[in-house]
Amino acid sequence: MKGNGVTGNANPLRRVGALFDGARDWWERAKTWQRYLVYLGAIVFALILPAPWIGSFMSPGADWTTVLIYPIGTYILLAVGLNVVVGQAGLLDLGFVAFFAIGGYTLAYFATEHGWSYWPTVVFGIFLAAVSGVILGAPTLRLRGDYLAIVTLGFGEIIRITANNTDEIGGARGIPNIPHPTDMPSLGIEFGVLPAPYYYLMVIAIVLVIIFSVRLQKSRVGRAWAAIREDEDAAELMGVPTFKFKLLAFAIGAMIGGLAGGIYAGKAVFIEPNTFPFILSATILAAVVLGGAGNLPGVMLGAFVIAWLPERFREVDWLKHALGKDPAEYRILLFGGVLVLMMALRPEGLLPSRRRKAELHEGTGGMGTMGAEVAGPDTDVSTTEAAK
């Protein structure tokens, strides 16, 4: 009902949401040259983002460039990868951190034990992550919704526990002395202890993955994923080989996760099983949902917010006075409260696409069968349809 402040824009935060929607609508109608101007502006912004005057506000309690690499840049890269699986294909994956771990451990093991150089090992890690995605997906992608989520959650834990109990890859002690990326003297780039080169490496990786993801989304593959996400049975009846395309989504998402793992391990120089907990999978999924699953700008915005807010809450003066204690102790609680507030006011995400917003209001949650009731052998289909 209009005028009661529920569906209208009386709430200031809803007006902010209306601004997001306006920006999205403008973007969908923007001409090519306008889009290229925005791309150029985004690249320039990314180049100047590590500037100290920005860091003094964004992260006064920690080195801003380091925060931009991890967690912000890593979360964005992982979120773009998970968005292929969850946002585009509509498959709920709760074990995405496993591919992040495979990329990291591949670099750590082969570089330290066999002396492989950095870049070929990262590529090999991406390949192994893709193969792992296929191995996971082949027997499980016939499941849907919650059942698929449980299986992927188990896969993520299997990878972590296996790493914890395998002495060949360091066991619980992990793997130290992972080499940095190979220097590029011709370009004047040296990867040492300074964070700036790693930040620009992360930016390049994110840009390449975004281009790849956008090209896929606009291709026949992207249209097949959208059909599967909206109604898998209808897509199957229309001749879409749903299993093949779902497997492809898993493999591509895993590749991006493996890439993130390789970059992270090269920067951190040490990894151990607890670097890849289940909560990281849940956090990246929260970033995708919060930003607006299926919409790349929204997913990146969600990942940025998820990664940045806990770091920002470490140093808030008025919170110190209000709580009488170090706000860092309460930062996760505050972070959770902000997330609840955001999802209460923007349940479709901060920056959803128009199409995904319509799917949400039609009752599919904008993610196909994700989280929805899965029909069983005794399900009364007519009753289920009538309830929609």
Image (tube, rainbow, N blue to C red):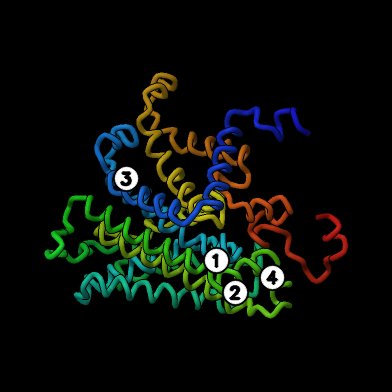
Residue carrying label 4: 232
Residue type for callout 1: Thr
Q: Quadrant of residue 143?
A: bottom right
Q: Secondary structure at mark 2?
A: helix
Residue 120 placed where, x, y %?
A: 26, 75
Q: CA distance from mark 4 to mark 3?
A: 40 Å
- What label sits on residue 152 in the rendered view? 1
Q: CA distance from mark 4 to mark 2?
A: 15 Å
| 170 shown above or below 75 | below
In the foreground, 369 or 96: 369
Relative side of 96 to 118, left or right: right
Residue drawn at x 62%, y 37% as measured from the top left: 345
Sequence-wise, which precedes: disc 4 or disc 1? 1
SS of the residue under disc 4: helix
Precedes in sequence: disc 4 or disc 2: 2
User: Along the polypeptide, which appears first: circle 1 or circle 3?
Assistant: 3
- The image shows residue 107, relative to residue 191, as above or below, that is below
Residues at marks 2 and 1 touching, judged by CB atoms closer than 8 Å = yes
How far from the left and from the top, in percent, is residue 248? 52, 75
Say which amino acid is labelled 2: Thr
Disc 4 versus disc 1: nearer the observer: 4
Name the residue located 39 percent from the left edge and 76 percent from the top edge.
128
Up-down relation of residue 363 to residue 98 (above or below) = above
Q: Are marks 4 and 3 in contact (CB under 8 Å)?
A: no
Q: CA distance from mark 1 to mark 3?
A: 29 Å
Q: Which of the numbered marks, if any, corresponds to residue 67?
A: 3
Q: Are marks 4 and 1 in contact (CB under 8 Å)?
A: no
- Residue identified by numbered label 2: 140
Q: Percent x, y for residue 199? A: 28, 52
- Distance of label 4 from label 1 (alpha carbons): 19 Å
